[in-house]
Image: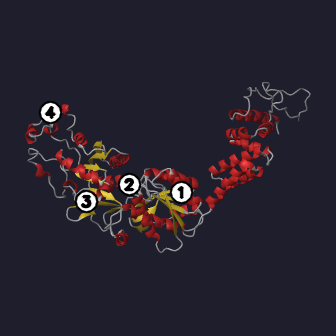
Amino acid sequence: MPSGRRLLSVPLLVAVLVACGTAPPPRAEPGPAPQPADAPATAEAPPVVDSDSPPGEPTTPSAITQGFAARLSALDGAALIDAVAAAPAADLESALEQLDPSAPAAAWAALRLGRLAAHRRDFRQASDLLSLATAAGGEPARAARETLDRLAARRRVVPGRIGVLLPLSGPYAPIGKAALTAARMAVDGREGIELVIGDTAGDADRAPQVLESLVLEKGVAAVLGPVGAIESHAAARAAERLEVPLMALSSRADLTRLGTFVFRHRLTRQAQARTIGRHAVETLGLRTFAILYPDTDYGREMMQAFWQTVTRLGGEVRGAQGYSVNVNDVNEPIKKLVGRHHLEARTADPHWQALNRKSKDKALHVPPVVDFEALFIPDGGRRVRLILPFLAYWDIEVKNDPQLSPLQFASKYGGDTPQLVQILGGSGFTDPRLIRQPPTQALNSVFVDAFWAESDDARPFVELWSGELGRPPPALAAHAYDATRLLAAAVEGRDDRAAVRRALLQSPAQRGIFGRTRVAGDGEVEFDLRVLTLDPAMGVVPQVADDDDGREGYFDEDAPRN
């Protein structure tokens, strides 16, 4: 080896070891030491010696490694465990080559390196290192064997076995039991498919533990569930760590971004908001909007997604107001939307003073400023039912009939004609608490949902469910049914979870309860959303009367593809 190259390598290695805390910092060297005049031309330069190093301190790479290995060998008990835990992995790898394989230091070093390899998903190297750790016996050997057993258990897969991870006890039990019933219906009579049930009790701390049990003890090939946002997040993280495909039934945002083994079969908030926003601009021709939203994570996410969509398509949001879900009074947010809150900037109007002369509220003595064509209310049926009558009180004239003309309000407005406002919503508008006895402002509203019980695609499942249980199915049951069918096709005959994951991603587009369905490359199961309206005579019907039940084929154009 040329002398200059050898001299540069030693200081570089020493500097690395200094950064790791295993050697004293070297003094900067000006360069190779000069050769004596009588030295042979082929002689190698002597190793660099730091004048600050104490006599006998190792200075060559092999000597430094041997010194670290010797120090580890001299330790025992807690001191050895602490030293191994604190050492950089690179130092442990080098020292392991110098240590006696039967020594406790080698066992502890191999145990830690094996666990690090398992964390990196390098399971072959992990198995080799953990097997080495068993040589010395004692505590490190026991811990290594336990980790090896877990690695072996996670590789064991029973083809056709699906874990079901749902809240079957506790306050959310009715939700979990409905999903479980649907899952059982989906595989009833199908040979080679088995469901193994796990109860999360709706507990985010319990969900990963139950998932791990399904994987390590039951050998499930994939998992259906959970439902709740927090428990689904916790379970998704565990599924990615265990490398088991998880088909969540939660609408929590960004759930599938937690890992490549995480899938979702549920209508998301963003999909709803994007679809109704796109339909409002592109199909209904609306350009100006206001948003009245619940001040919750759900409401804020829907508001933002809707706002972004209509703006991107050339629309404009003129106002957005949130309201507390803990009170039934939405007067103030609505007053702000129509310019009746900050009265110091407005002058009383004689016509409106006379019209509302019995009212002591000065806000009614100025005309409303309704500068938007549509109002988006992303909330559930119970609260929407309470909110809509407030709109009439504050003189937001809702277009509750396609044939309604603003001329009908001319006398109220002193000869002027008001802006008629189209009500827009999400899947909450299909809530029976709203549609069974809707307020007049709910009629002709336009909203989206994935599950419509009257569609040709949904009818067989609806009849099956109603025939057995005597009531219509909830939307979650429909998601659980179709999700289970997707999983069943993927796990059938496969004893490798990575292969199950690939099978899910490569599933051909097919028709299900929700119409056209496919698994996108980001793990989201995409399906058609239906644009619906509330007719006074027929109830919920497609808003677009065409040959496809009013479906909007809006697969997520932003999702990555395979």
Residue 451 position within the rendered picture, expressed as x and y whole percent measured from the top left: 35, 62
Residue with the mark numbered 1: 211
Q: CA distance from mark 4 to mark 1?
A: 64 Å
Assign a secondary structure to mark 2.
Answer: helix
> Height in image: 174 above or below 48?
below
Please report the residue visible at 13 percent of the width from the left and 35 percent of the height from the top: 348
Q: Earlier in the sequence, mark 1 or mark 3?
A: 1
Q: Tell me the quadrant of the picture where the N terminus can be found.
A: top right
Residue indicated by mark 4? 347
Gap between marks 2 and 1 measured at Cα: 28 Å
Quarter occupied by residue 14: top right
Q: Position of residue 491 (x, y in %)?
A: 54, 66
Residue of label 3? 435
In this rendering, the answer to whether 91 lies above or below 169 is: above
Residue type (three-letter) at the residue carrying disc 3 = Ile
Left of 538 or right of it: where is 307? right
